[in-house]
Amino acid sequence: MAYVPAESPFGDPSSAGEAGSGAAAPTPFGPTHNPASAAHHRSLSEITRLIRGLDSEETREQSLDLLCKNRQACDDLGILLWNSFGTMKLLLQEITSVYRPLLSNSLSDRAVTQVCNAIALLQSVASHPDTMMPFVKAYMPVYLYPFLNTMNCERNYECLRLTSLGVIGSLAKVGDAEVVDYLLSSQIFPSCLRCMEVGRTLSKTVATFIIYRVLLNEKGLKYCFNLADRYLSVSHALAKMVERLAEEEKENLPRLLRNIIGCYLRLSENQRTCQRLSTYIPSKLVDNTYTEILRGDPEALSNLQQLICNLKTSQRSRTQSTGESLGPFIR
């Protein structure tokens, strides 16, 4: 049965204090006096009923589906899931049940739908401030890495890939140093690079966002530059996406390009490697080929201009010290 926090914002009718002498004070949870609170309480009751429904194989599939569809209706869903006895175990069982079919290319649509629903519920836990760190410290994200590391491009694999990236993206978005340490130690870079290589546009967008958020942390940037191969792998993955932008889905293209520029800008802030970076960046990114895509995103345009400025400054320094001719970014 789900655990309901003592100070839940939805309230608990049984906890209302008794009125003093004289006229009875109206209960704050009565539908007549406070419809909003009553609706919240009914919503909470329904959520806890659905969580209990996960315990039974007969109702699990439907409960997963309904919880997933209504997860935005309950701000504390992450807390309820995390503290409900046996619920996290059940969600992990759903997720790990497709490991073998994942390797044998025998995933069924029904199994993928259930697993994606389970993963989406994990995102509610990962994104809640009260359960994020317990979730990380329990090493829960690693159960999703097999879906990030598959090289299969078929639709079912893409659904698992994208939903798993959503969980990691929720963690990376916060920018917590401890979370970044965990992501680095669990080898999130190679997993995201694979998604950037084989995923569809939205998966590439989320994977690039994760890399960008990690690079914003000084430890993340240092991690990228610790090994030449690691830095080159990130640079080459970004360059490949730039070269193939014309093939991507137009709807998500602006966000993907925004994240690519953010990654390049962060890499250009390292003076030691900025001089080499200009040799890896495709000319399409800096010759106004994609400027029109960013017309509605002033911040991304500003980042692109700053990136070009950093590259020009680096090339001037290199020219002054070596006497080499100016590169293609000096106009």
Image: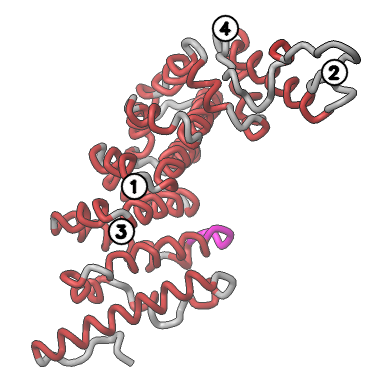
Identify whether 83 is placed above or below 151.
above
At 86% across and 22% down in the image, what residue appears? 31
Label 1 or label 2, whichever lies nearer to me, is 2
Taking depth in this image into account, of 23 and 116 the one nearest to the observer is 23
Q: Are marks 2 and 4 in contact (CB under 8 Å)?
A: no
Label 4 or label 3, whichever lies nearer to me, is 4
Q: Earlier in the sequence, mark 4 or mark 3?
A: 4
* Range of residues picked out in magenta: 248-252
Secondary structure beneath label 1: helix
Secondary structure beneath label 3: helix
The spot of residue 326 in percent (x, y) is 21, 91
At 43% across and 23% down in the image, what residue appears? 95
Q: CA distance from mark 2 to mark 4?
A: 42 Å
Q: Earlier in the sequence, mark 1 or mark 3?
A: 1
Query: Residue beneath label 1, please?
Result: 192
The three-letter code of the residue at mark 1 reads Cys
Q: Earlier in the sequence, mark 2 or mark 4?
A: 2
The three-letter code of the residue at mark 2 reads Ala
Residue 247 visible, this angle: yes
Q: Which mark is residue 56?
A: 4
Q: Which mark is residue 25?
A: 2
Residue 150 colored in magenta in the image? no
Taking depth in this image into account, of 118 and 20 the one nearest to the observer is 20
At 21% across and 84% down in the image, what residue appears? 315
- Answer few, some or many: residues within 10 Å of disc 1's Cα (few below 14, many 20 plus, some between 14 and 19): many
Q: Is residue 252 left or right of residue 303?
A: right
